[in-house]
Image (tube, helix red, strand yellow):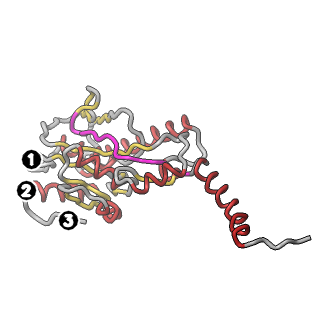
Amino acid sequence: MLSRLSRPQALAVLAAPVVALLATAAFAPLPFSLAQPGMTANVLGEDKGTPVITITGAPVRETSGQLRMTTIEATSPDTRVGLPEVVDGWFDTDRAVMPRDSVYPSGDSVKEIERYNRAQMKESQDEAVRAALGYLGREDDDIEVTLELADVGGPSAGLLFSLGIVDKLDGDGDGGDLTGGRIVAGTGTIDADGTVGAVGGVPLKTQAARRDGATVFLVPKDECSDARAELPDGLRLIPVTTLESAVDALVALEKGTGKVPGC
């Protein structure tokens, strides 16, 4: 037998599943990671007492200024991120909500992800060395470059590694430093041919750069709009597509000659 429900009764019946669904969502883990500005490191200097760049087989210049690679810090792969954390992250300018798969490989264990990130870093370092020596026309010289940076994984420091090698070996090509004495930060992958690739978390990296004193930030050109979205005051964006374009822009900025590109 069917009975007719009053309107309040009907609304109560309909609302019950919705409330249950929201309650479940509030406590269920979601496929997101929370990220915030991470550490930066001067590739021209030392990290935990060890030079980041060590070059043998060629004279090395004394440099001034800094070239700071930037990072983000994300919740660990096995951290449960629920709806309250996601909502808070959306409204917090110092944090970002990112799809977990954009931060970590999908379906891997924590140890597998750590190995993957270390492998990416090693490959990025090898590419950075080849790109720098190729740019300088010294890939056939008997030069050995060692890169050491603790507790950092992934490929996004490639551009800054290459620039650091170029600065230590050749500077601006005319006796000066690529930095012009400034604190220059940036991000970007690099291929052996010098092509700069996009990375994630650029708005957070610009915050980390400015926090640590940078006034110039090198950004992959395709990510200019992301970098502009929450750009800290006092930080100048320079878009780059290749190692050569990055060097040219820094030289033009240092010498005050030529056009320095902007986002």
First in sequence: mark 1 vs mark 3: 1
Amino acid identity at mark 2: Lys
Q: Which residue is mark 2?
A: 255
- Relative horizontal placement of residue 204, taking residue 6 as reference (left or right): left
Structural crowding at the residue carrying mark 3, measured as other residues with C-alpha within 10 Å and reported as few (<14), some (14–19) or many (≥20): some
Residue drawn at (29%, 36%) of the image: 145
Q: Which residues are magenta?
A: 31-45
Assess whether residue 132 is covered by the magenta stretch.
no
Q: Which residue is mark 1?
A: 176
Circle 1/circle 2 CB separation < 8 Å: yes
Q: Which residue is mark 3?
A: 261
Image spot of residue 33 (x, y percent): 49, 48
Above or below for 204 versus 5: above
Amino acid identity at mark 3: Pro
Q: Who is closer to the viewer here, 235 or 131?
A: 235
Above or below for 152 versus 15: above
Dominant SS type (magenta): strand
Determine the CA span between mark 1 and mark 2. Answer: 9 Å
Above or below for 2 versus 206: below
Name the secondary structure under disc 2. Answer: helix
Circle 3/circle 2 CB separation < 8 Å: no
Q: Who is closer to the viewer here, 186 or 4?
A: 4
Q: Quadrant of residue 230?
A: bottom left
